[in-house]
Image (cartoon, grey):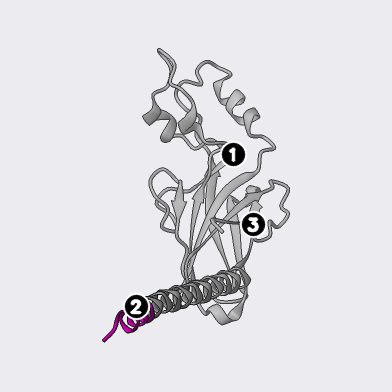
Amino acid sequence: MGIADTSIAAASAAFSGFAAIAAWRASKEANDTASSVAQIERDRWHKELTPQLRLKLEAQQGMLYVRFDGPASLGKIDVQLTVRDDFDRSRVPALPGGATPEQIAQTIWGPYRFRPGIDGADQLGRTVTPPPLEADDRTRLAIDPSLRPSWYEGADGGRRWRDQYRTARFRLWADCEAEGHRPWRLSFEVPQDGAWAQTGRLVGT
């Protein structure tokens, strides 16, 4: 083989190598694009299937009503409700002689809590898990006014605590699960006037 033939063979091999790399990159980019499109479609479908919940307070009865309006295609859904504080108090610095972070965490900073030990509520009244719901099902959960913390002292301590949340909304997380689907986390702010709160903001999307 002459020098010219050798050069041609080398160039041909190099070209083949570059072509193979280019083909691999094109294939990878196509796969990445397909994966991205598929993920976008899955996210869109997940959002469209967001459980439609309605929550309503009947404070005089000591009840929170929860209704699942659909979509029926989800079948049964499991819902865990968690009372949210008025704001994230884990960011509040502890003051000398004041409440400890543990005491703050053990306080429900809002107007209501779930009745401890009833409907599966925990002992703090922070979370509750009602029975599974199907479309158009409704359930009710026992609630109580939140307890004032021990450092709201004095004869007017209870009044100050009640006044703090007299018109505040009952803030909740609703974590929903349905078989074959990724979970949903919804946020609710339920008014105290007896109006229904519709499905809240979808969190984490």
How many tags in the picture? 3
Q: CA distance from mark 3 to mark 1?
A: 19 Å
Label 2 or label 1, whichever comes before in sequence order: 2
- What residue is shown with label 3? 200
What secondary structure is marked by label 3? Answer: loop
Name which residue type carries label 3.
Answer: Gly
Foreground disc of the pair 3, 1: 3
Residue 87 appears at what percent x and percent y? 56, 36
- What residue is shown with label 2? 7
Is 6 part of what is drawn in magenta? yes
Question: Which residue does the image show at 65% across and 28% down from the upper left?
Answer: 163
- What residue is shown with label 1? 111
Q: Nearer the viewer, residue 118 or 56?
A: 56
> Residue furthest toward the left?
1
Residue 60 against residue 51 in the figure, above or below:
above
Is 8 part of what is drawn in magenta? yes
Look at the image and give the residue range highlighted in magenta: 1-12
Q: CA distance from mark 2 to mark 1?
A: 84 Å
Name which residue type carries label 1.
Answer: Pro
What secondary structure is marked by label 1? Answer: loop
Q: Nearer the viewer, residue 174 or 115?
A: 174
> Residue furthest toward the bottom?
1
Q: Within 10 angstroms of label 1, few (less than 14), some, or many (20 or more) residues? A: many
Label 2 or label 3, whichever comes before in sequence order: 2
Question: Which residue does the image show at 45% across and 75% down from the upper left?
Answer: 22
Q: Within 10 angstroms of label 2, few (less than 14), some, or many (20 or more) residues? A: few
Label 3 or label 1, whichever comes before in sequence order: 1
